[in-house]
Image (cartoon, rainbow, N blue to C red):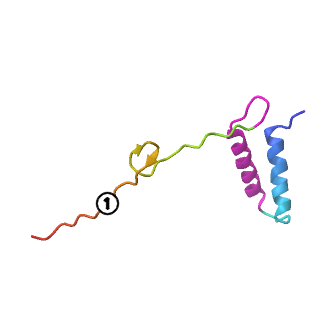
């Protein structure tokens, strides 16, 4: 039987409490952290067999246009100064 979302959060919050040395008054912080971790896990892409699918990283080009796969650096900008007349 698979555990429910609430059971997972409860177990994770308890583990966080133990890791911190059983502090008092931090139950809501541990619960929120566990809930956030679960939300993050649920937000990751997964296949039907449960294995995580890694999203392809977006490629960014910091230079100007490419030519034959070579990125040319963007021209440097110079500050324009207004002269007093």
Does 63 sit above or below residue 53? below
Does 76 sit above or below residue 50? below
Q: Position of residue 82 (x, y in %)?
A: 18, 66
Q: Nearer the viewer, residue 83 or 43?
A: 83
Kindly identify the residue that appears in the image at 41 percent across and 43 percent down.
67
Residue that protrudes farthest toward the right in the picture: 1
Kindly identify the residue that appears in the image at 79 percent across and 46 percent down.
9
SS assignment at label 1? loop
Check the picture and name the quadrant holding the N terminus.
top right
Q: Position of residue 74 (x, y in %)?
A: 37, 54
Task: Determine the image quadrant of residue 52.
Answer: top right
* Residues drawn in magenta: 26-51
Crowding at label 1, few (<14), some or many (≥20) Cα neighbours within 10 Å? few
Kindly identify the residue that appears in the image at 21 percent across and 67 percent down.
81
Residue that protrudes farthest toward the front in the picture: 68
Does 1 sit above or below residue 77? above
Residue that protrudes farthest toward the top in the picture: 48
Q: Nearer the viewer, residue 61 or 24?
A: 61
Residue that protrudes farthest toward the bottom in the picture: 84
- Count the marks: 1
Does 7 sit above or below residue 82? above
Based on the picture, tell me whether residue 3 belongs to the magenta stretch. Answer: no
Q: Main secondary structure of the magenta part?
A: helix
Q: Nearer the viewer, residue 40 or 27?
A: 40
Question: Left or right: where does residue 80 sit relative to residue 44?
Answer: left
Q: Position of residue 59 (x, y in %)?
A: 53, 44
Kindly identify the residue that appears in the image at 34 percent across and 56 percent down.
75
Check the picture and name the quadrant holding the C terminus.
bottom left
Task: Determine the image quadrant of residue 18.
Answer: bottom right
Q: Position of residue 35 (x, y in %)?
A: 73, 47
Question: Left or right: where does residue 20 sit relative to residue 55?
Answer: right
Residue annotated with mark 1: 77
């Amino acid at each position: 039987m698979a555990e429910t979302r609430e059971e997972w959060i409860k177990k994770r919050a308890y583990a966080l409490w133990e890791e911190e040395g059983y502090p008092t008054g931090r139950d809501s912080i541990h619960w929120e952290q566990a809930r956030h971790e679960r939300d993050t896990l649920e937000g990751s892409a997964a296949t039907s067999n449960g294995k995580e699918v890694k999203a392809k990283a977006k490629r960014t080009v910091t230079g100007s246009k490419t030519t034959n796969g070579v990125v040319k650096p963007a021209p440097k900008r110079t500050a324009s100064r207004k002269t007093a007349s």
